Amino acid sequence: MQQVLRLPVSSTEAIDAPEVIGHAETFRPHRKSSVTPAKSETRGLPLVIRDLRKAFGDNEVLRGIDLEIPAGQFVAIVGQSGCGKSTLLRLIAGLDKPTSGTISFGDTAARAEDVRVMFQEPRLLPWARVLANVEVGLGRDRKAAGAHERARQALEEVGLAEKRDQWPAVLSGGQKQRVALARALVSGPRLLAFDEPLGALDALTRIAMQRLLERVWADQTFTAILVTHDVAEAVALADRVLVIEDGRMAEDITVDLPRPRQRGSAELAALEGSILGQLLGPGTTG
Amino acid sequence: MSLIESLPKVRKLTVPRADGLLPWLVPLGIILIWQAASVAGLVSPRVLPAPSDVARAGWKLLWSGELGRNIWVSFWRASIGFLIGGGIGFAFGLANGLSQLSSKLTDTTLQMIRNVPHLALIPLVILWFGIDESAKLFLVALGVFFPVYLNTLHGIRTVDPQLIEMGRVYGMTDGELFRRVIFPGALPSIFVGLRFALGIMWLTLIVAETIAASSGLGYMAMQAREFMQIDVVVLSILIYALLGKVADSASRLLERLTLSWHPAFSKH
Ligand SMILES: Nc1ncnc2c1ncn2[C@@H]1O[C@H](COP(=O)(O)OP(=O)(O)OP(=O)(O)O)[C@@H](O)[C@H]1O
Ligand SMILES: [Mg+2]
């Protein structure tokens, strides 16, 4: 029954092992046609990354990432701990500058409000009530008329309308993460990047949150990039699963299954097994 | 504030109304025992006058207007000195917490000055200002400066960097970031500094007034000593205790009003 398999978190060393580096040569550049076609009515931003590199001192974390994400796609990124998933996300969100390479959001010049990140921690302001925390997400529109109303709607979207006047301290972990989601959604972002937003939640809350994510993504049609340790989560939610290894895109797997997907179904399990096999290296597939 | 007291209360043991009176039980008990001991002749009035004698002395001084005037003078010196020293300390704390340049420029100097006990400057201050008002204000301001400075600086430096990053991601300007993230985050620490400063404020003022003044509570106590009016001396000491308590209560009230989001301050 228990389908939630996690990658070993503390196996950073394994990434430098010779067989893993050799393994990365199996990188196959994705064909554009294999990508799930973008929904025609999407408001999402397309994302194009070309030869993206990022080094911290001598530590080359990203060694040439090439990636095209069509507007409105739900992409999951998996990989060993320390392989640079968060680094990639921070670059996409503009929190860090790449060492070289480019990131562009289609042809349109994206506004700051169009790209949002959700972190592993809720990062709510403890001294602001729930509603005010959501209003933070409006960015420069915070002072515009209707800010309250938009924040209230976003709270409703995540099912926390009745908590609007509470302090964050009294909320549960899952509720805090839902407020953080409302804050990320309130500006109507066109690209939303998630850095293991569900990592700290218990299994049941996690599944409820996954459903919520899927629903708001379907409603609001943004481009979603989800970094996760949990391969089951990746195949359950994403149109496409990317595997990062050794600073490069090692795998690009299209998950062409209808939604809503049945958790624990044979297809999902098979897909999950093959991705895990990839991640753990040859000979270790369970 | 003890550790246990600062923890959020899990369970209310007492009736809410009695709760407010409870802290006064011990001081009241001490005064009663003291009175009883004096009446029974266990304590000589030349060592410690009975509370009733102290109260009588206080009443007399109150009628003559002397007490009110001295309290007012001391209060005025304390507040002005506190505002000046606390204001400058707060400003330096902000500047050095927010700006690397400012911190590099001034922090070392300030840390060096901090290690000189400010009361050791009294002879110098008397030479500079005489026993003028400015001498007292200078000493109080100097004493108050450091706790406010250090705790403001510490508060700002320890604001959760993840929250600051969050603020930037959501497009806060520097001003907004300060108002909405950095300042509220530093506030609990600033209050710690404030309460330390209040303690130092009274200490400094009393020492300064005892040594070099011609008015104020410290001066009143010194005068009384010369005329062997021990009841007035004790009265002054009790008034110090009360004023200290008032200042502390005021800062606690402010704390409770501004930190209501904090689980530790939400219900007390
Ligand atoms: N600010 C930084 N300065 C120096 N090194 C950094 C910095 N941020 C990340 N790194 C390094 O970059 C590498 C990748 O880190 P990153 O956080 O992107 O990994 P990750 O894939 O998100 O791992 P995890 O799954 O554990 O979250 C690590 O070796 C880390 O030490
Ligand atoms: Mg990470």
Image: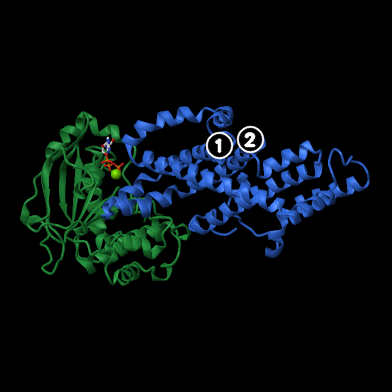
> Of residues A196 and A186, which is closer to you in this image?
A186
Instruction: Kindly check if marks 2 and 1 are in contact, taking CB atoms under 8 A apart as contact.
Output: yes
What secondary structure is marked by label 2? loop
Indicate the secondary structure of the residue bearing disc 1. helix
Q: Ligand 1 near label 2 (Cβ, under 8 Å)? A: no
Q: Position of residue A33 (x, y in %)?
A: 6, 56
Q: Residue at x 75, y 54 (%)?
A: B64
What chain does mark 1 sit on? B
From the top left corner, tell me how far across and down residue B16 is, in percent.
Answer: 67, 64
- Name the residue that disc number 1 marks: B135
**Is any part of residue B93 visible from this angle?**
yes
Specify the chain shown as green: A
Image position, residue A11 (x, y; %): 31, 36
- State whether residue B63 is above or below residue B199: below
**Which residue lies under the disc numbered 2?**
B212
**Mark 1 or mark 2, which is nearer the start of the sequence?**
1
Residue type at tag 2: Ala
Residue type, label 1 = Ala
- The residue shown at (62%, 48%) is B73
